[in-house]
Image (cartoon, rainbow, N blue to C red):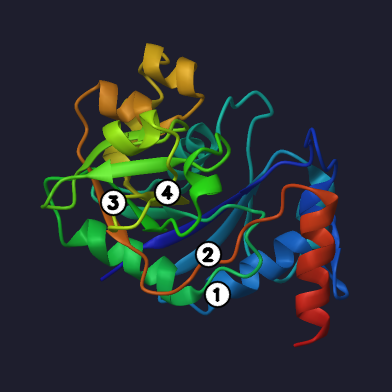
Amino acid sequence: MSFYVVVPARYASTRLPGKPLADLAGKPMVARVAERCLTSQADKVYVATDDQRIADALEGQVPVVMTRTDHPSGTDRLQEVAQQLGLSDDDIIVNVQGDEPLIPAAVIDQVATNLASHPDCQMATLCEPIELADDVFNPNVVKVVFDSNGRALYFSRAPIPWHRDAFVQGARDIQGGQWWRHIGIYAYRVKFLHQYVAWEPATLERLESLEQLRAMANGVAIHVAPSCEAVPGGIDTPEDLERVQAMLEKG
């Protein structure tokens, strides 16, 4: 199987400005992410950025593709990378978030393999069981429901599925394996990326602020599977940064 990894990295961040260059045990965060990606089975790993400071920090480590500054999402940035590199419609790109310095290489390989194995899907992603009721009701934890063939039915910040009797009565029992957290790693076919950027943002996408809903609104099948390994949370806040820094320092 052949696939590419692209790590979109923006310097601007509302909660953590300059996040890709944040120091993690002596290395910039984006370099830590790239190192993880390089241990996967990808043919090539690229970092896509619109900031020269990020490109300078990665010099000699991984190829950097300079992209426009006006991309509304990481998916749009990936499409420009595919275009610049001249990738074919059938090529597969895995989007690894630039704030995931602990992502296991096996998970990257898994999502690429899943897409390659399902030619009827244009995207693939992963999920993991939700163990805490608070996470079910947390809008920052994106939930996903999927059918018996591993096709996504919907993604939402709301608690889906809704336990009609228990939740109405105020109970918070989430046992039974019906609640899944979406893990934000994607594999795409290049042809889909070219289609995606031509579509207008969908109403559901705007409501939920979830870009994968643009694909679903246009009839795209998304493959979903439980991840083969646990995926540590990404870095969104200074507290997350301190947590990961401590983990890396301990080895």
Question: Callout 4: 10 Å neighbours few (<14), some, many (20+)?
Answer: many
Which residue sits at x=52%, y=80%? 39
- In front here: 125 or 27? 125
Which quadrant of the view contains residue 102?
bottom right
Q: Is residue 140 above or below residue 234?
A: above
Q: CA distance from mark 1 to mark 4?
A: 24 Å
Counting from the top left corner in percent of width and height, residue 111 is at 34, 61
- In front here: 37 or 140? 140
Which mark's residue is nearer the viewer, 3 or 4? 3
Mark 1 and mark 2 residues within 8 Å of each other at the beta carbon: yes
Task: Identify residue type, mark 4.
Answer: His
Q: Is residue 10 above or below residue 106?
A: above
Label 2, on which residue? 45
Is residue 133 rendered to the left or right of residue 173?
right
Q: Which mark, by number, is residue 178?
A: 3
**Placement of the N terminus among the 4 image quadrants:** bottom left
Mark 1 and mark 4 residues within 8 Å of each other at the beta carbon: no
**Placement of the C terminus among the 4 image quadrants:** bottom right
Label 1, on which residue? 38
